[in-house]
Amino acid sequence: MDGIMRAAVFDGSDKLDVRNIPISKLISKEDVLLKVKVASICGTDLHILASKGLGGLVPTNTILGHEYVGEIIEVGSGINYLKIGDMVTVSNNIPCGYCDYCQKNLPNMCVNMRSIGVKENGGFAEYSIAPAKALYPIPKGLPIEVAVFAEPVSCVINALSKVKISPGAPVVILGAGPIGQIFVRLLRFMGVGKIIVSELSSYRTNLALKSGADRVLNPDKENIEEGVKAETGLGAELVVDAVGTLFGTALRLVCSGGTIILFGLARDFKGEGVISQTDIMLREITIKGSYISDYSFPVALRVLKQDPLKIEELISCRLEMSKINDGIELLRKGNAVKVIVYP
Ligand SMILES: [Zn+2]
Ligand SMILES: [Zn+2]
C-alpha cells in the first residue's frame, strides 16, 4: 500500500520517536498487511529503551511494539487461509522451523528466531507487515483490548506448563508488574491455595489484591521470608521470580521439594549472582527457566475468550500513540500495569 503512516520508532535514545514514515509493502507472498487496531506496551519495550537496544540486538530505526491486534487489509498471494477483514493477534517471535532446536520441538530456542517489534518492525504504527504463520485470528466477540494480552498470557501459560502444581498449593509471586498480575490471575483460576505477592509500588499492590492475591508484602517495609513462612508454614510450593533478579530470595521462600520459575529478565542480563548450589541439592529444589512462548497462543486466546482472568482490569491507561512516551513514563514509575495505545 502506498502512503505515509505514523509510527513510534526506537532511535537509540530512551524515548520513542513518533514520526511519519512510508507504509511498508508486502515483499514475501507469505506476508500480510495489517491495519493496527490496538497495541500494548510491554516490559521488554522498557528494557529496550533503558538499555539503548539490548546490547545491539535492536537495530536503530526499528518500529517497536510486539503486542498488538490488527485487521488484515492485504494478503500475500501465497496465503489462502486468511482473508481481508480478519482480526488477528501476532505471535511476534517466529521460529525458523528447520534449525536443530526447532526440529527437537523447542521452537522458543530457535537459533534463527525472528522477532517482530524487537529485531524488526512491529505494531506501534498505523500499519504493520507480519508473516501469515505468526497470525492467530481472534475468536468472534473477543474485544481487541482483551486479545492484545495474548502475547504476555501465552508466555505465562508456557511457564506454568513446565511445572506440576497441586490444588491448594501455596505460591509466591515476586513482582506485581503485568506478568506478575497475570501469574496471580492464572494461578487463582487453576486452583492454587494462598497466593502471596512481593511488590514495592502501592498502585501495583492494590491491583495484585484485586487480581486475587491473598497478601502482598512490601520488601522495603517487612521481612518477606518471615511473612511467607507465617502464611505457609514450610514455604511456598511454587515461587515465580517475575522481576529477574530475585533468585536468591526465591530460594529462601520455596519449601523443600518445591519449584522456582525464573521468568523476569534482569536489566543487566545477569540477574542475581550468588546462589547456594548446596541448598538446591540438599532441599531438592526444581528450577525452571521460562522464555517467551511455546505455541501457547491458542490456549491464551481460549482462556481470554472464557474471561476467567478479567484481564481488562489490568489496563491502567489508554492513549493515542502520539502520547506513547507518557505511557512509558507511567510504567517506569510503577504507576501503571498495562498501557494500551491506539495508532
Ligand atoms: Zn511482551
Ligand atoms: Zn529454528
Image: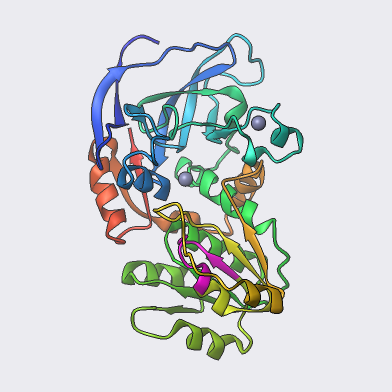
Is residue 212 in view? no
Position of the N terminus, as image quadrant, is top left
Residue at image position (45%, 37%) is: 66
Q: Nearer the viewer, residue 201 or 260?
A: 260
Is residue 240 found inside the magenta-colored segment of the image?
Answer: yes
Residue at image position (34%, 41%) is: 341
Instruction: State which region is magenta.
Output: 239-248
Q: Residue furthest right?
A: 104
Is residue 294 in view? yes
Q: Position of residue 295 (x, y in %)?
A: 66, 41
Q: Position of residue 217 (x, y in %)?
A: 43, 79
Q: Position of residue 53 (x, y in %)?
A: 36, 38
Q: Position of residue 27 (x, y in %)?
A: 50, 11
In which of the image's four quarters is ligand 2 placed?
top right
- The correct choice, above or below, for 240 with respect to 47 in the image is below
Q: Nearer the viewer, residue 238 or 12?
A: 12
Which quadrant would residue 140 be assigned to in this image? top right
Residue at image position (40%, 53%) is: 268
- The correct choice, above or below, for 234 with respect to 11 in the image is below
- The correct choice, above or below, for 26 with respect to 215 in the image is above
